[in-house]
Image (cartoon, rainbow, N blue to C red):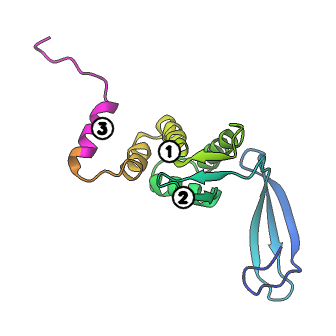
Amino acid sequence: MRCPFCGNIDTQVKDSRPAEDHVAIRRRRFCPACGGRFTTYERVQLRDLVVIKSNGRREDFDREKLERSIRISMQKRPVEPERIDQMISGIVRRLESMGETDIQSKTIGEIVMEALARIDTVSYVRFASVYKNFQAADDFDKFVSELRPDIPTDDE
């Protein structure tokens, strides 16, 4: 593994342990050339996925991009980081096991929203605001009102 600090290709593994509920291996590494320490994760990848964007453009699936967008929506929320990692791994496994290598970005968005809705409503609304491209406060109001169950009024 190449050192991210100096580029040396001869780094050493100092410690390995299971991570993300045993679906990844966390490795602590050391670079003898510069003394830098860094962590890598090893995961099973069932197949190479390609994301088909709404404009028809194709790009390789990027787990880090998915993880960044989910973590942004969950910032400052009372959800344990391990739970977030499990959710992300579950989403990726679900995408890889769909049987297709080409996946519509819309499908990924829907799967993420479904997972977020089960874990944290605020994160779900945050993600939806970007995913559904909310333009005004009315968009939030309409979306949130669809989340709430009908509350009977005194007239009923």
In the image, is 62 to the left or to the right of 78?
A: right
Residue occupying the point 27% across, 33% down: 145
Q: Residues within 10 Å of mark 1 (few under 14, many from 20)?
A: some
Three-letter amino acid code at the position of disc 1: Lys
- Dot 1 corresponds to which residue? 106
Q: Which of marks 3 and 2 is nearer the N terminus?
A: 2
Determine the image quadrant of residue 37.
Answer: bottom right
Q: Position of residue 24 (x, y in %)?
A: 77, 52
Q: Give the range drawn in magenta.
A: 139-156
- Looking at the rendering, which quadrant does residue 154 occupy? top left
Rendering coords of residue 23 (x, y %): 77, 46
- Residue situated in front as seen by the camera: 19 or 48: 48
Residue 117 vs residue 135, the one in the foreground: 135
Compare residues 58 and 136 and report the one nearer the observer.
Answer: 58
Give amino acid for label 2. Answer: Arg
Is 85 within the magenta?
no
The reply to whether the magenta stretch includes residue 150 is yes
Tag in front: 2 or 1: 2
Which x, y percent locates residue 84?
Answer: 59, 48
Q: Which residue lies furthest to the top in this view?
A: 156
Q: Disc 3 on helix, strand or loop?
A: helix
Q: Distance between the residues labelled 3 and 2?
A: 31 Å
Label 3 and label 1: CA atoms lie apart by 20 Å
Instruction: Name the residue rendered at 65%, 47% in the picture.
Output: 102
Look at mark 2 in the image and give the residue it sits on. Answer: 57
Mark nearer the viewer, 3 or 2: 2
Q: What element carries label 1?
A: helix
Q: Residue 144 carries which label?
A: 3
Q: How crowded is mark 2: few (under 14 residues within 10 Å), some or many (20 or more)?
A: few
